[in-house]
Image (cartoon, grey):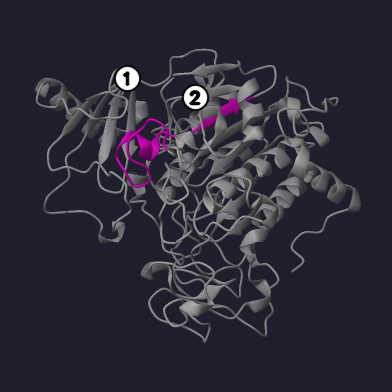
């Protein structure tokens, strides 16, 4: 597969970077003259990691894995203790970040691999807003926001997609690493696809003759649950059925090199004008298959090694910003789409090898959950000469990145644009600890509302019940038939439900929740 075309000099830089990207040398070590001026609009890079918990990085106390490049970011930027994805699952969080509105407004939920585009052409988005401000925009990595109009022919141009909603360039995993089609999509076309071997994908019946995990478990490198036991690609069974496209199939272990080099190319080609890069990781989502050079970099097996791999990729991209002379005028935001999960469909020893590491840090719950561990995620913001070097307790939501960047580049928002997004740029840069008063947390079963350190969890409906796909994730979900109220000031792990002590506050929080859902945050302050 010839996805990456690298010059010899870049290849040497890349190989050297494997061992030298750290706080002490590599990505942040070589000071070079900047080709940009801080009077210009800054470049923006968002590193969006998948399923990374608050406690999964060493600046937040990780045990068993080291993240030196994130240590370097945290040592120079703003590291947040109370930053949140909007939801505890991936699709609604991604939707919110890119549209500035909560996922429930579009009924966003975890999408199947053949879902139509969730963000439709004409919808105002973060990249389209930045395009209006003169930015070149690119997305690289996992998409999982749907493509096409509901019946994608993978052998033709696949659209609408990122290019129709504000991105100038895209290089994607169409859905996720555990879903077919297991191919790269560059702009509108599947990479390296041969016309003589067309792709067919189905999520309701088997297509073609590729073996499945159910039929041939002896072919698997890693056991999987029934949901993840359909078409086998690269020794791993996936969700969904796929035939054809043999020359286009990805190799999971190549993700860090393929995606980082695509980011390098984008930065090099876009450096003359302000650019926005949305780097959306597959790591550390299942299936976790880190490159050989990262195996054993942690004490936690594939999940920990995938964290080390993710950190290396951050360093590789940060290094390229230096090489191209644009680092000093680049605003970097590092965060995750939701909280952590250990056993999410594949037997990779994530539970057995955890040791003393706590993926969600001191917080209860994780991915899918309404407890803090579901949406309270790592977040670091770094902009040389502009961001403070502090650890901030500001209450931050990823939905606010949209309005904050709009304010930064002086791009006015329309009345119905980004209706849940607030301009908290001063807090993002560590210039103030004041950000949000109210924050909504979506989960797989209900919603919660933060008011400063008070947290209200809305009761679930007995009639509606919970999604049957949740299964046994060994995560405390927090879904109850009665309201819950926690004071996080002295109960950070949400152990004591105080709803009965404060019925007036519970009612007020319920009313505020409904108001925010109906009107949006910009019109409910």
Q: Residue at x 57, y 66 (%)?
A: 158
Q: Is residue 362 magenta?
A: yes
Residue 432 marker:
none
Span shown in magenta:
360-382
Left or right for 387, reference 419: right
Front residue of this view, candidates 462 and 470: 470
Disc 1 or 2, which lies upstream in sequence? Answer: 2
Q: Is residue 127 magenta?
A: no
State whether residue 278 appears in this view: no
The quadrant of the image that shows the N terminus is bottom right
Front residue of this view, candidates 310 and 266: 310
Front residue of this view, candidates 47 and 236: 236
Left or right for 376, reference 198: left
Query: Disc 1 to disc 2, how far (Cα)?
Result: 15 Å
Dominant secondary structure, magenta: loop
Percent from the top left, x then y, of residue 420?
39, 33
Q: Quadrant of residue 27?
A: top right
Q: Is residue 367 above or below residue 211?
A: above
Percent from the top left, x then y, of residue 229?
43, 72
Q: Which residue is mark 1?
A: 452
């Amino acid at each position: 597969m010839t996805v990456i075309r690298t010059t010899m000099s870049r290849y040497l830089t890349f190989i050297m970077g494997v061992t030298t990207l750290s706080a002490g040398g590599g990505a942040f070590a070589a000071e070079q003259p900047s080709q940009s001026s801080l009077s210009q609009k800054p470049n923006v890079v968002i590193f969006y990691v998948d399923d990374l918990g608050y406690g999964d990085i060493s600046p937040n106390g990780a045990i068993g894995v080291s993240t030196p490049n994130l240590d370097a970011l945290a040592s120079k930027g703003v590291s947040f203790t109370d930053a949140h994805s909007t939801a505890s699952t991936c699709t609604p969080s991604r939707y919110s970040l890119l549209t500035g509105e909560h996922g429930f407004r579009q009924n966003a939920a975890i999408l199947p691999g053949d879902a139509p585009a969730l963000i439709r052409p004409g919808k105002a988005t973060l990249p389209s807003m930045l395009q209006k401000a003169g930015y070149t925009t690119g997305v690289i990595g996992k998409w999982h926001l749907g493509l096409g109009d509901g019946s994608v022919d993978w052998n033709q141009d696949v659209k609408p997609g990122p290019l129709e909603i504000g991105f100038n360039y895209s290089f994607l995993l169409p859905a996720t690493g555990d879903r077919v089609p297991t191919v790269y999509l560059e702009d509108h076309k599947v990479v390296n696809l041969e016309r003589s071997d067309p792709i067919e994908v189905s999520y309701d019946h088997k297509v073609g003759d590729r073996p499945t995990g159910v039929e041939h478990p002896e072919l698997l490198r890693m056991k999987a649950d029934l949901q993840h036991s359909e078409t086998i690609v690269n020794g791993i069974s996936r969700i969904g059925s796929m035939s054809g496209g043999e020359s286009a199939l990805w190799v999971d272990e190549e993700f860090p090199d393929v995606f980082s080099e695509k980011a390098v190319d984008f930065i090099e080609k876009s450096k003359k004008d302000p650019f926005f890069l949305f780097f959306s990781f597959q790591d550390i989502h299942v299936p976790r298959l880190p490159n050989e050079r990262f195996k054993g970099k942690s004490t936690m097996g594939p999940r920990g090694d995938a964290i080390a791999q993710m950190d290396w990729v951050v360093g590789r991209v940060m290094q390229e910003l230096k090489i191209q002379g644009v680092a000093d005028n680049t605003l970097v935001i590092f965060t995750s789409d939701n909280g952590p999960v250990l056993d999410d469909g594949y037997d990779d020893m994530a539970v057995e090898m955890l040791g003393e590491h706590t993926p969600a840090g001191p917080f209860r719950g994780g991915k899918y959950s309404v407890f803090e561990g579901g949406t309270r995620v790592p977040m670091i913001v770094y902009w040389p000469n502009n961001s403070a070097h502090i650890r901030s307790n500001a209450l931050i939501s990823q939905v606010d990145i949209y309005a904050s960047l709009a304010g930064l580049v002086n791009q006015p928002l329309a009345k119905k644009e980004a209706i849940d997004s607030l301009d908290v740029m001063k807090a993002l840069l560590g210039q103030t600890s004041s950000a949000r008063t109210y924050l909504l947390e979506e989960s797989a079963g209900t919603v919660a509302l933060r008011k400063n350190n008070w947290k209200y969890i809305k009761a679930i409906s007995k009639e509606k019940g919970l999604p049957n796909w949740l299964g046994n994730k060994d995560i405390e979900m927090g879904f109850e038939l009665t309201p819950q109220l926690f004071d996080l000031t002295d109960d950070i792990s949400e152990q004591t439900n105080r709803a009965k002590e404060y019925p007036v506050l519970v009612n007020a929080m319920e009313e505020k929740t409904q108001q925010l859902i109906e009107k949006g945050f910009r019109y409910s302050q």
